[in-house]
Structures are given as C-alpha cells and as structure tokens.
Amino acid sequence: MSVLTTDLYTLTMADTFVRHHRDDLVSFEVTIRRLPPGRPWVMVAGVREVVDGLLGLSSTPEELDWLRADGRFSDALVDALGDLRFTGTVWAVPEGTCLPAGVPLLRVTAPRVQATIVEPVVLAALNYATRVATVAADAVRSAAGRPVYDFSLRRLDGPEAGPATARAAWLAGFAGTALPLAGLLHGIPTVGTMAHHAVMARGEDHEEDAFADALGDHPEGTAVLVDTYDTTRGIERAMAASRRTGSPLRGVRIDSGDLAQGARDARAQLDAAGFGDTRIMLSGDLDAESIGAMVRDGVPADDFGLGTRLRAGDPLGGVYKLCAQHDETDPSRRSVMKRSPGKETDPGVHGLARRGTGDDTELEIHLSHEATPGEPLLHPVVRCGVEVPGALDLGAARERAAAELGRAGTVPAPVRRSRALRELRSSLSGELLLGPDDALVVVDVQHDFLPGGALGVPDGDRVLAPIGRLLDRAREAGATIVASRDRHPVGHVSFAERGGTWPPHCVDGTRGAELHPDLDLRGATTLDKGTDVDRDAYSAFDGTRLLERLRAAGVRRAVVCGLATDYCVRATVLDALHGGLPTVVVTDAVAAVDVQPGDGGRALEELRAAGASVATTAAARAH
C-alpha cells in the first residue's frame, strides 16, 4: 500500500499530528451503520486485503518527491512517511461471519499517524469484499447445493477488483472462478467453457467443428457454449463432436434466452441421446432471486455462473471511527465517542459476543476487558506489525461461511450493550441507554393522580408522552417493565377521614385507581400497593416483593418514572438504592405534587445525594 493510496485529508491530519508531536497510541473501529431494508446481515470478508494493505504500507522516492513539491506538507511529515511501516495490532471478526449492522467488525490499534493514513484502504477493502461475499452468500443459499461460479471480471470496477471479488465469492461458498490469477493467489478452482467468438470464427455451418476443436484439445472432456445460434441445434452438434472426437461432453452452457425453458429442453435432449451425465450450466445476468426461482421450480440446471450481478446492490456504509486514545493523560478523553445525530459511536475498545442461533441470536458489545458469556467474535489477526499465523486461513473462512449460512436468521439479531459500556456512554454523553438487564419502573400513573383526579398532580399528564417513549425503548431493548398502582380499600389509613394526609384516592374498583389507558403496558407486570387498610405504602417496593422479582429476572439497574416526584417516585427510588440497585430518575417523565413550592426539585436533589442518577427521555435509547 502506497502512503498516497489515501485521502488528502488523512495526509493533512497526519501533518498536523507530526507538527504537534501527537503520534500516540490510538484505536479505531470499523462498523456498518445501517443495512438496506430487508437485509438482516452481511457476510464479513476483506480482512485479508486489509491486512495485506497495512503490512504493505510504504513509500517510494518519487512519492516523497511529489509530496515535497506539492508544498502543503511539512518536511517532518515527508520524512516520517519515508520511514513509515505499519507496527500496530489488528483485531477482526473472522471472515465468513454473518452479522447485522451496528457492531464492531475490525479494530486498528496503532500510532496515530499510521492509524490515520490507512483509513480509506481499510474501508475500501472491507466494504467491497463484504458486499461481494454477501451477494455471493445469497446466491449460494438460493442454489440449495448446486454449484455457483464467479464469472464477474469483465463487469467489475476495473481489473484490480478481480482477485478480491473471486476470493470473497469463494469464501462465501462459490465453487470456483473464471479468473486464473485468483487460482494462483488463493488456490481457488478455475473453470471456463468457451466464447461465442470461437464458434463464430468457424461460421454457423461449422459449429460442430468448433466444438470438435475444443473437445479434441481436451480428451479428458470439457464443456461448450451452445447458444451462439440455435441452442437445440447447438446441443445436437456438441453431442456429435463428442462422438467424433471420443472426448466426453462434460457440460453445456446456456447464456441467453429463456434460461429455465432452455435447461428443460436441453435436459430432455441430452438424456434422449444418452448424454445423461452431461451437466447444464446457466449464466447470463443471474442473481440470487432468479436462481432461487429456478431451483424452486425444479429447473434441471446443474450449475450457475454469476457475472454482472455479483457486485450488485448499493455500496456498504462501513465507517472507521476513533474510539480510544490509550496514552491520553486525561482519563475523560481516553475513551471517545462521536455524538452526531444518527452517527453516534460507542466509546472505548470493544469485544463482541454472540449467543444463540437463527432468529434467536443475540449480540452483545462490551468493553474489551469484560468477561461475558457467548462466542467471542473479535480475534487478533496482526500483532505489532506481524500477521498472526493461521488467522486468515481461507479454507477455515470458507468452512465458517458454510456454517454461518446454516445458522443465519431471517431478521437482524438484536444488539445489546453491556452494563459497563452503557455506563461509559452515559458518563460521556448523559445518554440513558436501556438494556436487557434494566427494569423500567412506572410509578402510579393513575387517573386520580392526573389532572382532574381526586389527588391530581398539576400538569401531571405531561409525563404520558415521555413514559410512552420509555416503554417503547424498554420493549425494544428487552428490559423488564413494571407498573405500580395504588389500590386502596375504602377507609384507607392515608385518607383524611382517618386522620391521614390525603383525600380518598385510587379506591379499589373505581376509575381513579386505573392506570391511564394511553400507556402501552404490553409485557409489563402490574403490582398493587397500599392494599392493607391500616398500612400506607408509597414505594413500588413496599409489600410487592418487587426487589426479589427484579433480582430473579437478572435486573441490575432500575429506571424510574411516574407520579409523583416528591412522594411515590421518591420512595421508590430510595428503596431501589437501599436494595443495592443503581437507579436512574427520568426527569421529564416525573412530575411533583409540590405541596410546598419546590418540593419536587428538593426531592430530586435528595435522590442525587442518595446516589441516584438523572436523565431525560430525549437522550434515552434502546441498546
């Protein structure tokens, strides 16, 4: 890889880093932000090309002279580039793995100048090969065991793309390639028939002679292209040439017309003439969809060739983003994250674990030092500038791809963040991330506590929309959802008629005791409190065994919202903290009675002092 095989801005940034003596150790990670609708996964490929590019990083005197002559770069940068070699470490997901968007696929840890300059090549190699492998994997799946071959070179974006395309397709399960260079470089089986012009050179009346030339030159047998003029007559002449030369007619290829009907007619014609072992290959702008349709319809094709559409689809949107600055002396700047809307990144250096198979697969992104259950998916492929032996074995990648196609689901696997990663994100951005080990506790959003109710919280109905968002995100994240409600008997001890503080409210069997119908509580557990006529209960934990329930569900954090901040929410948060649960109060999803003006604010300050965190739904996301 030439130091000039990069973007100009990476050189200008590298120049600034050199000028300011900032060549410290950093980590960048590659993720694919999103996939097209209906696409649940991609098959990872291109790590081989990434590693080859990194380990081949170098410069020539002519390139350095060009940089000096350009005039925009310091002599210090040009001198540094003259000696530049990749000395870093690379971790990657094994090629052939099927993964959804939003997870780390590859990490580069290296001095800042090296890690900066290699960005475009890393992304070009990984984005392109992953796209090809994914298209090829779809075709392999659709072919249902029938061989598929790479015929794509003449349709690619330049001949240099040929070896990488053939490798990615072979990795994904193709049976071979028409590109001899891929055979040399990667040991991929090479295949081919003949061109139409070889038949045309003999003329239509001498088509049999053209076939006889090909068969005679290959006494072991070969395949011929039979649709230059008339397919039925071409097959007849190919069989005659086989009889004439004594060479087996291994196969016929049909590249035009109605391929399905052509295959049916060819099979009948070959079988009737005693050529039942002759294979039928179809090609001509095929893709996974058309192959799948023919397989389902029982079309008697033995092999398929993909050319034009092997590089189909939109380019993938893989990105390469800084995640850690290992030598940074300020701890708050060691783990970094991008917060641009729709382009957020995870801070820190990550691992990726997978659990389950098919549509039950779940992925967890965690900080690299965390031990987590499941199959670890990021492994070192380069250490300190040296390739890890065996890490990029193509045969192993091909075997993995076959296994992955057997286990890949039809819907995107959910992606979770570990508790430590969510806490790190929250500490850097104030962002509340809900996960499967969270519990969303919705406190007492009942008619009697809303405006117009017997004990209505002023402006209390403003919490309905934020709580609705939290409920949606909690379901998306697989979090536990609990809704508490007062369910008082007539004459409850809290009522003023018995010397209590409040007017009668939330009386069992009345509308006032019901939770507001706008709350979508699908999947939630509803807990009643305050059901003992002689005992009051503010907290959702009081008399409900909620703490035991949450521990049994594996909950490690409580996220609390509802009514009212200065009474039942306050008591619930304090009990969660006393029970050992880290707790977050969602401030735009609570409202206060404020019997004394400012009670709500003072309650939040008390909860902060007790150890609770605060967040808003504007920053809440499901992870």
Image: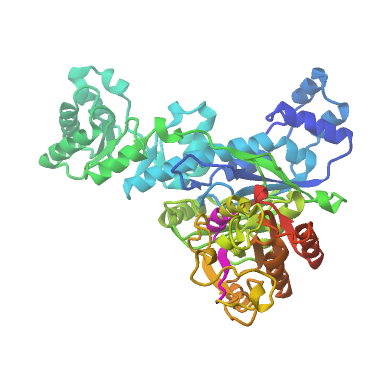
The residue sitting at the bottom extreme is 534
| Front residue of 416 and 151 | 416
Locate the N terminus by quadrant: top right
Relative image position of residue 373 (x, y in whole percent): 59, 67
Which residues fall within the magenta stretch? 470-489
Q: Quadrant of the C terminus?
A: bottom right
The answer to whether residue 61 is magenta is no
Q: Is residue 262 visible?
A: yes
Figure quadrant of residue 82: top right
Depth check: 568 or 130 in front? 568
Tell me: residue 55, above or below residue 428.
above
Q: Nearer the viewer, residue 335 or 192?
A: 335
- Count how many numbered circles sit on residues in the image: 0
**Residue at 70%, 73% in the rendered image:** 575
At a point 79% along the width and 23% down the height, the residue shown is: 67
Residue 399 horizontal/vertical position (percent): 46, 55
Q: Position of residue 531 (x, y in %)?
A: 57, 78
Drawn side of residue 438 relative to residue 239, left or right: right
- Identify the coloring: rainbow
* Residue located at (47% from left, 28% from top): 156
Residue 85 appears in the figure: no
Residue 283: image x %, image y %? 32, 33
Quadrant of the image occupied by residue 452: bottom right
For the residue pair 220 and 286, the one nearer the viewer reads as 286
Q: Is residue 573 above or below residue 135?
A: below
The reply to whether the magenta stretch includes residue 471 is yes
